[in-house]
Image (spheres, grey):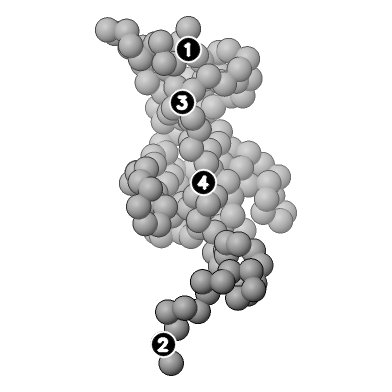
Amino acid sequence: MDIAQLTTQSTLPAYIELFDIDCTAIAGMGNIYRYTPNVNGNTSVLFGGDTYLPFPIEISDISASADGAPARPTLAISNVNKLFGRLSFSFKDIIGAKVTYYRTFAVYLGQATKISAAPMKYTIARKTSHNMSSLSFELRSPLDSDRGMLPKRQMLKRDFPGLGINKVM
C-alpha cells in the first residue's frame, strides 16, 4: 500500500520523521549522519537499508509558497554528545552540508526501499545559535543559491528586445 492510500484510512500508523545530514561535500569530512527524533523509546530504526539513531533533532518554519523567496527553515540539533559542536568548530559551522528530511509512517520502517512523502532537501546556510545544549542552523533550498542568476548568460538587447525600454535617463 502506498502513502496516498494509507492516508485515506480512518486510523493511521505512527508518523515518523527522519533526517540525513550529509557532510561529504565539506572538505575533510566524509560522514553521513542519520537521526530520528525519539522513536520507539531509545532504539534505532531501519529505513531504506539505513540505520537512523534516536537523537533530539527538530526542523521548524517549513512552508511551501510560490510567492517571494523560498522558506529558510531552522534545524535544531542537540549538543548532548558534543558531536555537532566539535564539527561546527572544526569544519566552519558545517556550512554546505546537505540535509534531507523524510516523513513516513511506522509501517514503512525496516523495508529495503524508502517509501515516504517527497523528501525535503536543504543545505545548511549558516549557524544561528550555539550553546552548551543545542545548535541551530538556518537551512536553504537548493533553488535558493547565493548570487545565482537566471539565465546564466549576459542579457543583450539583440536577444531580449524589451530590455531597457523602461530605462530612466
Residue type pointed to by label 2: Val
Upstream in the sequence, badge 2 or badge 1? 1
Crowdedness of circle 1 by 10 Å Cα count: few (<14), some, many (20+)?
Answer: few
Residue type pointed to by label 1: Asp
At a point 37% along the width and 43% down the height, the residue shown is 64
Q: CA distance from mark 4 to mark 2?
A: 40 Å
Upstream in the sequence, badge 1 or badge 4? 1
Give the residue number, with chain letter if any, for mark 1: 2
At a point 54% along the width and 59% down the height, the residue shown is 145
Q: Nearer the viewer, mark 3 or mark 2?
A: 2
Q: Quadrant of residue 95?
A: bottom right
Residues at circles 3 and 2 in contact by the CB criterion of under 8 Å? no
Is residue 72 at least partly visible in the picture? no
Q: CA distance from mark 1 to mark 4?
A: 25 Å
Q: CA distance from mark 2 to mark 1?
A: 57 Å
In this view, 133 is above or below 148: above
Q: Which secondary structure lies at badge 4?
A: strand
Residue 7 locus on image (x, y percent): 35, 14
Q: CA distance from mark 4 to mark 3?
A: 15 Å
Q: Which secondary structure lies at badge 3?
A: loop
Q: Quadrant of the C terminus?
A: bottom left
Q: Which secondary structure lies at badge 1?
A: loop
Position of residue 153 in the picture relative to residue 70 (left or right): right
Q: Nearer the viewer, residue 49 or 78?
A: 49
Q: Nearer the viewer, residue 142 or 65?
A: 65
Q: CA distance from mark 1 to mark 3?
A: 10 Å
Give the residue number, with chain letter if any, for mark 4: 122
Give the residue number, with chain letter if any, for mark 2: 168
In this view, 158 is above or below 71: below
Residue 88 locus on image (x, y percent): 54, 56
